């Protein structure tokens, strides 16, 4: 698994550190993926330094996830926290951008970084929605326990759904509502 995520060259360059990292994560795929995701996004640090960090108290998936979440840069952490509140089993970058009131291009870049960190999964591609992502269930649980912005994110998500429906069926009339949140960008459908 480490070879698949980190690449054969990186694992072969530090085989003892790779083995120690796998042992520290107790061979649990999610814990190993989270740790490897941190390694991928910090290529200047040695694998041994990541192993030492992991060994400093990570003995379970929740602990590994907590450290992974705490080490996220602020934009990624904010996006992941808000995306975890969206009441949908899967996400696309346009929906996340609308629900978090962020530009679509930046949202897509952050989602891809979260996939590289193994906090999200890229689950496929749909013609209208584009790339589809899902938040790993254990990660979603940890984030939801800490979230305090649920109502605003859900309202923005629902507003995005209404705006998308209007775009797809412009001949239908939508009744005006109070507290409507306008997306940072107009609703767009993904292009192939």
Image (spheres, helix red, strand yellow):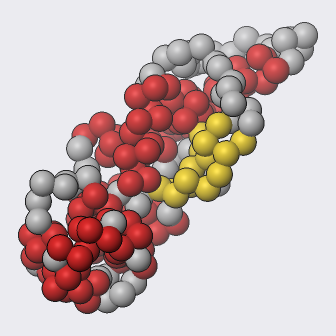
Is residue 16 shown left or right of residue 162?
A: left
Seen in the picture, residue 99 relative to 171 is either above or below; the reply is below
**Corner quadrant of residue 146:** bottom left
Residue 49 located left or right of residue 81: left
Residue at (28, 84) in percent of width and height: 22
Q: 169 or 54, which is in the foreground?
A: 54
Q: Residue at x 40, y 28 (%)?
A: 106
User: Does residue 92 appear left or right of residue 28 in this picture?
Assistant: right
Q: Position of residue 39 (x, y in %)?
A: 24, 62
Give the tally of numbered discs.
0
The location of residue 127, given as percent across then percent down, is 74, 36
- Would residue 85 be found to the left or right of residue 19 on screen? right
| Quadrant where the image shows the N terminus | bottom left
Q: Residue furthest right?
A: 171
Residue at x-position 37% and y-position 46%: 113
Q: What is the x, y in percent for residue 144? A: 44, 56
Q: Quick check: 19 above or below 76?
A: below
């Amino acid at each position: 698994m480490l070879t698949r995520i980190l690449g054969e060259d990186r694992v072969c360059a530090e085989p003892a550190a790779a083995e120690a990292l796998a042992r520290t994560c107790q061979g649990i795929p999610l814990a190993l993926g989270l740790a490897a995701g941190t390694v991928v996004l910090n290529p200047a640090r040695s694998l041994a330094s990541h192993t030492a960090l992991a060994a400093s108290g990570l003995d379970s998936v929740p602990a590994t996830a907590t450290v992974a979440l705490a080490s996220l840069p602020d934009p990624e952490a904010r996006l992941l926290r808000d995306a975890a509140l969206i009441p949908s089993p899967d996400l696309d970058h346009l929906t996340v951008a609308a629900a978090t009131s962020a530009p679509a291009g930046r949202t897509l870049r952050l989602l891809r970084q979260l996939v590289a960190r193994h906090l999200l999964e890229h689950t496929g591609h749909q013609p209208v929605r584009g790339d589809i992502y899902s938040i790993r269930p254990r990660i979603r649980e940890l984030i939801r326990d800490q979230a305090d912005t649920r109502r605003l994110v859900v309202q923005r998500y629902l507003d995005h759904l209404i705006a998308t429906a209007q775009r797809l069926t412009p001949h239908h009339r939508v009744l005006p509502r109070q507290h409507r949140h306008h997306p940072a960008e107009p609703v767009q459908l993904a292009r192939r």
